[in-house]
Amino acid sequence: MDLDRIILDESEIFHPPVKRSITIAGHQTSITLEPLFWDLLKNSAEKRGLPINALVAQIDVQRLDASEPPGLATAIRLWLVHDMLGKSPQSD
């Protein structure tokens, strides 16, 4: 992941979550993420050549397959950390 593109000043690191609306699997939903995680999500989607909605839909499918599925925002945060560590399944 190109972390050099994710540059936040100290006030942005501790910014509270922001609610954003997206459409996944044909349904409108909202996701509340901190700006840092939103930027990481956008970067991951761009890296894969996908719209954010498509990447979130893929994460959602993986989340729902879990034995104890977390909420979508939590699943996105966890997926992003795994992606940064090089452990996420490829979403090709």
Image: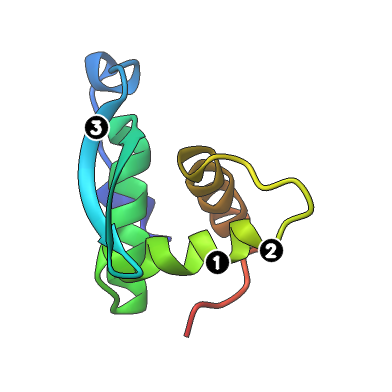
Viewport quadrant of the N terminus = bottom left
Left or right of 83? Residue 33 is: left
The Cα–Cα distance between marks 1 and 3, rounded to whole angstroms, is: 21 Å
- Asked if the residue under mark 2 is in contact with the one under mark 1, i.e. CB atoms within 8 Å, the reply is yes
Residue 84 image offset from top left, x and y in percent: 54, 54
**Type of amino acid under label 3:** Lys
**Type of amino acid under label 2:** Asp
Residue tagged by mark 3? 19
Residue tagged by mark 1? 61
Point 24% across, 14% down: residue: 11
- Residue 10 is marked as none
Point 55% across, 66% down: residue: 61
User: Residue 66's image quarter?
Assistant: bottom right
Q: Secondary structure at mark 2?
A: loop
Q: Is residue 34 above or below residue 65?
A: above
Residue tagged by mark 2? 65
Considering only order in the chain, which callout, 3 or 2, is on the residue closer to the N terminus?
A: 3
